[in-house]
Image (cartoon, rainbow, N blue to C red):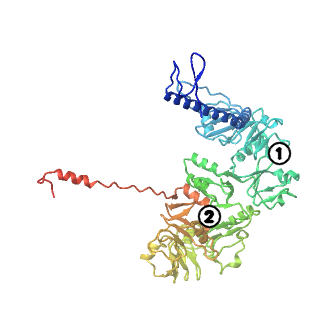
Amino acid sequence: MLTILAQTSGGGSYLGFGQDSAGTTIPPAAVTFIGVFVALIALLLVIKALRKKKRPRGRRRNGNAVSQKRQRQQQKDILNDYVVAAVDMDPLINPPTGRPRPIPDELPAGTLLVSQRLGVKCLLIDQLNEVGRRTLKEICARKLKAGQAVYLPMGTQLYKDEILHQGRGFVAKLRKGSLFTSVGGHPNSYLLDALSLPLRKELTGNPQVLPITESTAQKYLQNLVDIPASFDLVKEDVLFDASSENQRMVEKGALVISRSGALVGLMLEDYQLPHKGPLSDLEALFQLRTHFERFPLETLIQRSAKEGSRPIPIDRGTFIFSSAGKVYFVWKEGLEVDEATLIQWSKYPSINHQSLLEVSKTVANRIGGPGVVVTQDELNYLRDVFRQAGTTNLLKDGLLLDRSVLYKFMVDLPYAQTGKFRHLLGTKVHQLNSASKGTFSIELGGKDIEITDADLHAVREHLLPEGRMLIKIGTQMRIRDERMGDWIYIAHTNLFYPYETFTRPYMEEFIPESVRFKGREKKKSVIIGPQDKPHEGDIGGAGEPIGDLLAIINNALGNKEEPRPVFVLDGTLFHWKSKIYRVNEELIFRPHEVSDKLGNADLEGLSADWKINPVVEDDEEEEEIPDFVEAEEDLEDLPFDTGAVR
């Protein structure tokens, strides 16, 4: 209990509660107020004392956080001291109004030019004279040759090589893909992997650092910089380094770089280092020959964009590096791809095209397919290129053109690049036409030989652009219908048949006398989605969401006995990543177009193309119910005899 005493003004004695004083009287309310006030002050003092006890720990934590922030800022400041200064091209090309900025007449080698507006970062390898706005615009349009400049990605770090020669007190970590320049401005080193400073080895013996000379920078540096970040880069010297520090595994898909900076190989398998023996004995390495062109997929997209999104030709013998870390090879002539197709290739984990092959030992080189013609010269070419990377398999229903004769393969032919198939003639391989060709026609088919509309199209394209074709008696003719089953006809007499009339609408209305209808083949496809009358094997006919769409598609495509095409109809619902997705347009998956199993990355590519999208359920808005009671009250106020229409 708190006792409050009041001191008298005269004698200095104290009065207790209830005592009288001559000149002083304290009201009870004031005494209560003073007591509460003093108790509040005491409570605040206790809280303040407790805070003082806890304050030292808080100060230590804050001090550690501040010190870490200072260390990061100091390290950033240290790196900034070695960053190569850049020249901003945007105000030089389009100067602000009233502030004309002069353009230098000469740009020396080693100058770094940047345009944030156009996303261009360019390092000059050679000096440019008579520089003007037109020259700067050509730089931004990437028109400089490889010997003049190297175009860097916008995130590439460019340092002075002095940073590599700092002592032990200099601690920093440099990112993969960083480039270093000498005092004269020439690039002399490139980081194949992340590097921690200070260096523990000599610069030339460090596996992460690739030394670059002036001549090799003009030849190989642009190709080296353009390699997607998904690839691991390994120096060729590392393969033969027998030191204890080099006892490591080189992963499949890593690119091997020579001492000069050129791409020399691709690792097709995981390999334990070091390698013993010559490089030619390394079976896991697929050697990339120097006379072949190499382009990242992003570079081809930029080239197509410069052409106004028009199709650009890609020569045979070109290696394409995808953003998913895979390498593809162009093996057919006449490949032209537009920008939209290239962008679509960049969204999916694998590229499926009849002119491309994936360089791999695990994935077989699969070529051909229904109506696809492969020449014997192309098989010989593939045998020469892919001698180190597995075999080439010719798919079922594929066509082989050899000396004006078409051969059709009724089964998959492994080791097609050997060219040995003559012993299969008459059983698993059919000769479609004879070697001799008449003036106005070409003889096709025969007893037990099958010809499809796709085969006739190939004959028109490669053997007989004009004129009529003689289809022999006994030939089985097929109009392909992947969805509901093929239409089968038989030629019971010799038939001169123009290609344009072998279509389903023509056969329904004008079936020739020499051709009779044999029947409709059983449906082999799998249709997924809402249907009025689903067939046997179809899934989701009632429109309910599909549980595992990828598993259903892969089971149909990978059926060993009979691979079947899959049609996913528009409006199909399926579960994926804890959400329900809807198919926006019909999706078709054919066995000869899918080289590997479909995965989540394929659905992510479809989602990026807006071919599938998650179902968003909107909240149902409650309808406002009108208050009829008030309306009845208003009607009672009206007079009985009104002019209202009843």
Q: Which residue is mark 1?
A: 206
Q: Dot 2: what SS?
A: loop
- What residue occupies the far left of the structure in this picture? 641
**Residue 403 seen anywhere in this rendered image of the structure:** no
Disc number for residue 221: none
Q: Residues within 10 Å of mark 2 (few under 14, many from 20)?
A: some
**549 or 229: nearer the viewer:** 549
Task: Please tell me whether residue 479 is drawn above or below residue 602 in the rendered image.
Answer: below
> Would residue 95 appear left or right of 286 to someone viewing this image?
left
Task: Please tell me whether residue 230 is drawn above or below residue 49 in the rendered image.
Answer: below
**15 or 400: nearer the viewer:** 15
Q: Dot 1: what SS?
A: loop
Expressed as whole percent of the image width and height from the top left, the position of residue 21 reads 53, 21
**434 or 201: nearer the viewer:** 201
Sequence-first tag of 1 and 2: 1
Q: Which residue is mark 2?
A: 598
Expressed as whole percent of the image width and height from the top left, the position of residue 505 reads 44, 72
Amino acid on which the number 1 mark rests in the picture = Asn
